[in-house]
Image (spheres, grey):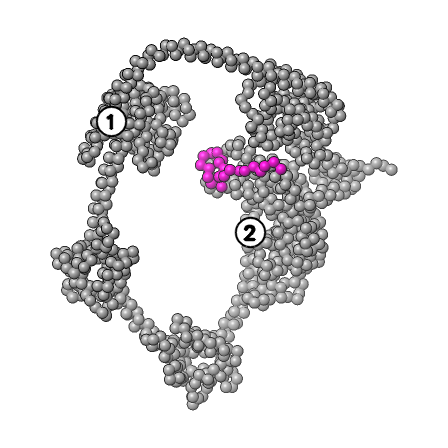
């Protein structure tokens, strides 16, 4: 609708004060004639509408000069959109209008007519509003039509007056234009000849200056640039000319060379300060556009320093010309003088820019040459001083370079190595796996990869050293491998350390093998077994028993026999798998011993197992002690887990208390919910919190707990949707040790933790039907059993549940128990979505800004009106949670004191908010019925007395006026005496 209304508006004259006064008399007369509190003339100013005239009667909520968004005045918006009268006898009885914002002001009767300019462009509306149905106004609608015609006649007179003024102005303009044209033609011919001559001289100057930089020496560059600037300064008769360099990283511009016949000290500094100002930097560097300066420019916001700089330089005008290289502004040419540069021909600016490009390229070229020379010097120093051997050799193996470290390392001088074949230090050794010819050919044939190898090298004095080499190809201009760069590191110490470690490991394995209580050996090839005396003792076998694998297996407990056999088989087939296993041995007399066995398998050069050596440890006494200790640990852990669980919930409760804060909001919907919550808090009844996701149901659950007499007890929060389905029962009701696989200790459940306190079952609609049945028993009987226990546990728990689902629909679909719903729905409270409490958005935004200012160290103090309007108009499908995310991102991206939204808030089109509202659960209707019954009960107790110490308002702890308003809304009337 806003787009359609915007297209209706074009430039129109303002309404004179005398006309506005006349219209004010019209609305006063209209209000009196039809007996309404509000008679108005509105003027459309998309996307808003302004009150131009308003009757000054009691009860009129609209004041002259008020401006409102069209969405906030849907009556007038409809008249403007349809271009037709609109009559609404009672908006409360009309589904199309019952929820519009004007109804909240009490204005339910509306009669309005459109107002249009003579060209049929919409101007606004004339309308009357009343708090009740007004048949008189409807009957006198023809009277309003007369006023409509009177206002439109005034609009016609205003337009005709403006057209007369424009016609006179146009006639005067044509008269002046004819007079000036006759006087200018004679002077133009003289100026044209002089301009052509000056243009020719300037192009000669540009060509001359350009030729000077063709083959200029780097040492002469500064003087040549200064001379060129002096010639430019003389040609244009300027008092100052300079070349400036753009420093992109710091967004600064500094003077490189300057020429000035007479200027104050620090002139170049002043120009650099001016050119680096954000506004000028953005124009000439970011946008790449020339910029003319004058003292008049100082009137532009952000350029106030221009006047001071020009006065300091004793000039009146300036011109800044950006110079671009490869699409990026690198330098700026500045001209200052008393001539107006904005009157220059465009060709002058273009040629000066070309000269600047020549200067810039010459300077950049010199910088690149200096950097290249420095880089080459650094590279040579790096190579010479590196702590690695660096050698460069040709395709045939001839050494062309060796760094100083390499010369010292191998004991050769540069003359002894350069020109020699690399085999002088890399001998051909089959034992070392080095093939120099293959290495060279591999690098030449595969230049895309490196070739790494380790080999033994020989020094001049005969020392043998182990080196690791990295080879990289170097290409010529044709892309062919010309040389190979080889970098080597000494790994001799590492190789010796590896050999020593290998011998040490062999000794350690042997010591472990023969130093245990029992040892054994199995020759896998010959299938011969050897058992030590200690082995016989552990297994309880006589020494004359012949060792064999079959006898070994029969001594193992039947339940462990397969696992031991599998361990032996796996270790033999998989060399990487260690043999370490614990099992039980049954001695001939029936005694059981617990044994831990380790073994090592030896393989031949073909990785075939040949021998297995191992040890056995009798762990029986140690295991019995461990079991006793483990039992004690389990009992201690159970107590520790209980204390930790209670501690966690206490800590979470403290964090929630610190982080939840007060419920923010002064709107009627939120105050009504708080009123209901306080009523429910004083009772022990079960409360069901419903509402869309993100509305803050958890915060209201904590509010109910804090307002109840259980505030000093536990508040346990259970997220039914966040717990795994296979663990949620044990989390809610606890479990005994051994209740299921992996249950090694007893765990107390959330209901036990919440005993004498409050438990909040968040997202209760996610519970399975089986758990719903158990929960119903807790609500009805106050008792349950831990998982794996036959004993019932009695608890005294106040239950608060929440859901964003429609539980009545879930019941119909067989996903929620009807009996559980009735027990939970004793006192339902629906948390309103954010779109129904838009008046709270400014308070919420300010509170969130204060919070995130502390979090991110910001100092945001203001919220631009347009941003606040966007936040208020957005329907917030994600409710408070979405608002928190939007404000947090906005605080992060905001740099100054004003809040800047991180993304555009897209206001939903007309009607979409209503579609969202239609998704509100049906439980809202039950909410009003519960409130009505609660008020009736209080009135019956007080004999229908509202005010006073013994009145219903005192009993309900609300203001008497509030109670009367609720009684009126809910249709509660005192019964007549019989």
Q: Residue at x 34, y 75 (%)?
A: 606
Look at mark 2 in the image and give the residue it sits on.
652
Q: Specify the label residue 913 is tagged with.
A: none
Q: Nearer the viewer, mark 1 or mark 2?
A: 1
Whether the magenta-drawn stretch holds residue 88 is answered as: no
In this rendering, the count of numbered labels is 2
Q: Nearer the viewer, residue 707 or 322?
A: 322
Look at mark 1 in the image and give the residue it sits on.
206
Q: CA distance from mark 1 to mark 2?
A: 78 Å
Residue 76 placement, left or right of 592: right
Identity of the residue furthest to the left in this view: 415
**Which image quadrant: the N terminus?**
top right
Q: Secondary structure at mark 1?
A: helix
In the rendered image, which quarter is residue 636 located in?
Answer: bottom right
Main SS of residues in magenta: loop
Q: Which residues are magenta?
A: 889-911
Q: Residue at x 49, y 78 (%)?
A: 562
Q: Residue at x 60, y 17 (%)?
A: 155
Where residue 561 sits: x, y (%)? 49, 79
Q: Residue at x 35, y 23 (%)?
A: 293
Q: Nearer the viewer, residue 132 or 340?
A: 340
The answer to whether residue 798 of the structure is visible from this angle is no
Q: Nearer the viewer, residue 756 or 534?
A: 534
Determine crowd level at label 1: few under 14, some 14-19, many 20+ residues with C-alpha closer than 10 A: some
């Amino acid at each position: 609708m806003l787009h359609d209304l915007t297209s209706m508006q074009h430039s129109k004259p303002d309404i004179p004060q005398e006309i506005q006064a006349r219209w004010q008399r019209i609305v006063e007369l209209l209000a009196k004639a039809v007996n309404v509190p509000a008679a108005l003339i509105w003027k459309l100013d998309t996307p808003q509408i302004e009150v131009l005239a308003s009757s000054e009667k009691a009860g009129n909520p609209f004041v002259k000069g008020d401006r409102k968004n069209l969405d906030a005045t849907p009556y007038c918006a409809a008249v403007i959109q349809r271009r037709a009268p609109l009559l609404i006898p009672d908006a409360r009885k009309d589904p199309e209008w019952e929820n519009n914002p004007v109804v909240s002001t009490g204005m339910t009767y509306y009669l309005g007519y459109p107002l249009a300019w003579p060209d049929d462009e919409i101007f606004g509306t004339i309308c009357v509003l009343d708090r009740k149905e007004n048949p008189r106004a409807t009957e006198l609608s023809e009277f309003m039509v007369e006023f409509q015609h009177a206002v439109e006649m005034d609009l016609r007179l205003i337009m005709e007056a403006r057209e007369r003024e424009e016609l006179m102005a146009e006639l005067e303009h044509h008269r002046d234009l004819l007079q000036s044209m006759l006087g200018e033609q004679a002077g133009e011919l003289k100026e044209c000849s002089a301009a052509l001559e000056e243009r020719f001289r300037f192009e000669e100057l540009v060509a001359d200056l350009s030729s000077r930089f063709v083959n200029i020496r780097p040492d002469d560059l500064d003087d040549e640039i200064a001379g060129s600037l002096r010639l430019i300064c003389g040609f244009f008769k300027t008092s100052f000319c300079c070349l400036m360099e753009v420093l992109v990283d710091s967004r600064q511009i500094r003077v490189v060379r300057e020429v000035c016949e007479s200027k104050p000290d620090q002139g170049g500094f002043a120009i650099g300060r001016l050119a680096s100002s954000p506004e000028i930097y953005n124009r000439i560097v970011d946008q790449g556009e020339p910029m003319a300066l004058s003292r008049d420019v100082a009137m532009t916001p952000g350029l106030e320093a221009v006047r001071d700089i020009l006065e300091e330089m004793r000039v009146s005008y300036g011109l800044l010309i950006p110079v671009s290289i490869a699409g990026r502004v690198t330098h700026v040419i500045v001209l200052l003088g008393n001539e107006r540069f904005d009157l220059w021909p465009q060709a002058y600016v273009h040629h000066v820019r070309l000269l600047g490009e020549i200067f810039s390229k010459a300077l950049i070229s010199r910088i690149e040459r200096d950097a290249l020379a420095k880089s080459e010097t650094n590279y040579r120093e790096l190579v010479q001083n590196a702590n690695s051997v660096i050698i460069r050799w040709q395709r045939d193996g001839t050494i062309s370079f060796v760094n100083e470290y390499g010369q010292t390392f191998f004991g050769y001088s540069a003359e002894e190595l350069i020109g020699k074949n690399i085999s002088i230090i890399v001998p051909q050794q089959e034992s070392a796996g080095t093939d120099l010819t293959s290495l060279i050919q591999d690098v030449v044939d595969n230049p895309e990869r490196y070739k790494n190898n380790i080999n033994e090298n020989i020094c001049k004095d005969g020392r043998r050293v182990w080196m690791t080499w990295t080879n990289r190809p170097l290409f010529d201009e044709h892309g062919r491998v010309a040389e190979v760069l080889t970098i080597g590191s000494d790994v001799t110490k590492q190789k010796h350390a590896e050999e020593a470690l290998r011998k040490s490991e062999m000794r350690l394995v042997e010591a472990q093998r023969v130093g245990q209580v029992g040892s054994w050996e199995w020759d896998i090839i010959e299938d011969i077994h050897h058992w030590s005396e200690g082995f016989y003792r552990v297994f309880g076998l006589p020494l004359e028993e012949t060792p064999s694998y079959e006898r070994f297996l029969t001594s193992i407990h039947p339940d462990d026999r397969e696992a031991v056999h599998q361990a032996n088989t796996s270790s033999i087939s998989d060399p990487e798998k260690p043999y370490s296993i614990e099992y039980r041995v049954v001695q001939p007399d029936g005694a059981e011993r617990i044994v831990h066995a380790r073994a090592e398998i030896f393989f031949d050069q073909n990785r075939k197992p040949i021998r297995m050596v191992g040890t056995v440890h009798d762990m029986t006494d140690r295991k019995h002690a461990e079991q006793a200790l483990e039992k004690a640990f389990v009992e201690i852990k159970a107590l520790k887990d209980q204390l930790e669980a209670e501690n966690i919930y206490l800590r979470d409760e403290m964090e929630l208390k610190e982080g939840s804060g007060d419920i923010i909001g002064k709107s009627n919907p939120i105050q009504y919910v708080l009123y209901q919550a306080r009523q429910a808090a004083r009772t022990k009844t079960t409360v069901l919190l419903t509402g869309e996701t993100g509305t803050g149901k958890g915060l209201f659950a904590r509010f109910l707990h804090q307002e109840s007499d259980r505030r000093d007890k536990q508040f346990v929060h259970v997220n039914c949707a966040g717990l795994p389905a296979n663990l949620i029962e044990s989390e809610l009701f606890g479990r005994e040790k051994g209740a299921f696989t992996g249950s090694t200790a007893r765990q107390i459940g959330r209901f036990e933790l919440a005993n004498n306190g409050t438990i909040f079952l968040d997202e209760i609609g996610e519970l399975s039907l089986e758990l719903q049945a158990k929960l119903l028993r807790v609500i009805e009987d106050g008792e349950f059993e831990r998982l794996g226990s036959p004993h019932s546990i009695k608890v005294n728990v106040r239950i608060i549940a929440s859901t964003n689902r429609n539980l009545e629909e879930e019941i119909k679909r067989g996903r929620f128990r009807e009996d559980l719903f009735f027990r939970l729905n004793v006192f339902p409270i629906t948390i309103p979505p954010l779109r129904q409490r838009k008046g709270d958005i400014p308070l919420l935004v300010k509170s969130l800004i204060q919070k995130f200012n502390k979090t991110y160290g910001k100092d945001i103090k203001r919220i631009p009106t347009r941003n606040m309007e966007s936040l208020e108009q957005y329907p917030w499908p994600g409710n408070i949670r979405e608002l928190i995310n939007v404000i947090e991102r906005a605080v992060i991206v905001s740099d100054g004191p004003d809040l800047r939204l991180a993304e555009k808030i897209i206001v939903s089109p007309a009607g979409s908010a209503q579609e969202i509202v239609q998704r509100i659960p049906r439980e809202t209707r039950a909410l009003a019925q519960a409130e009505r019954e609660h008020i009736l009960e209080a009135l019956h107790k007080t004999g229908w007395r509202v005010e006073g110490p013994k009145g219903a308002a005192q009993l309900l702890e609300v203001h008497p006026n509030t109670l009367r308003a609720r009684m009126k809304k809910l249709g509660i009337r005192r019964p007549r005496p019989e």
